[in-house]
Image (cartoon, rainbow, N blue to C red):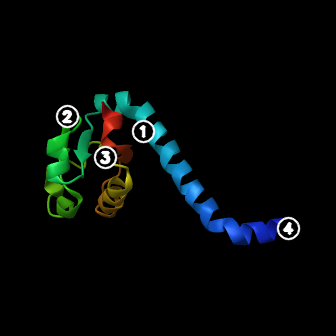
Amino acid sequence: MDFLDLFEKYWPLLALGLWFAYKWWNSKKVIAMLPELRRNGATFVDVRSAGEFANANAPGTINIPLNELGNRLREIPKSSPVVLCCASGTRSGMAKLLLKSKGYRKVHNIGSWSKLL
């Protein structure tokens, strides 16, 4: 079995591994930027459901569930950085795409809200 056969057979696993590696790397990058983001007045938004947020959250975050985000954009200033979080980084990744499409320039996905503690 040559490399091409292996790649053809295992590319879904490779793609999944690369996706998780990217999420991990990006989260580490945002964590390193937190002091600067805080100094620059970043808005911290937790896009989990209200129930999840009420159960546990990071101090200083506001809760705007992902399904409400499009209707509540006025609560997030465009003039300062935005740091998004959720349970795993998936919903905050979707929120990042939405904010970017609405003209927000400095948007960061930290992944899990617990990384803000």
- Name the quadrant of the N terminus: bottom right
Which residue lies under the disc numbered 4? 2
Horizontal relation, residue 71 to residue 98: left or right: left
Mark 1 neighbour density, 10 Å: few (under 14) some (14–19) many (20 or more): some
Horizontal relation, residue 2 to residue 31: left or right: right
Is the residue under label 2 in contact with that under label 3 (CB below 8 Å)?
A: no
- Name the quadrant of the C terminus: top left
Nearest to N terminus: mark 2 or mark 4: 4
Label 2 amino acid? Gly
Label 3 to label 2, Cα distance in Å?
12 Å
Mark 4 neighbour density, 10 Å: few (under 14) some (14–19) many (20 or more): few
* Secondary element at image label 3: strand
- Mark number for residue 83? none
Q: How many marks?
A: 4
Q: Residue at x 73, y 67 (%)?
A: 7
Is the residue under label 1 in contact with that under label 4 (CB below 8 Å)?
A: no
Residue 69: x and y, percent?
A: 20, 59
* Secondary element at image label 4: loop
Label 4 to label 1, Cα distance in Å?
39 Å
Label 3 amino acid? Cys
Label 1 amino acid? Val
Residue reaching furthest to the right: 2
Label 4 amino acid? Asp
Residue 45: x and y, percent?
A: 24, 46
- Mark number for residue 85? 3
Label 1 to label 2, Cα distance in Å?
16 Å
Q: Residue at x 82, y 65 (%)?
A: 3
The answer to whether residue 76 of the structure is visible from this angle is no
Nearest to N terminus: mark 1 or mark 2: 1
Which residue lies under the disc numbered 1? 30
**Nearest the camera: 47 or 83?**
47
Nearest to N terminus: mark 3 or mark 2: 2
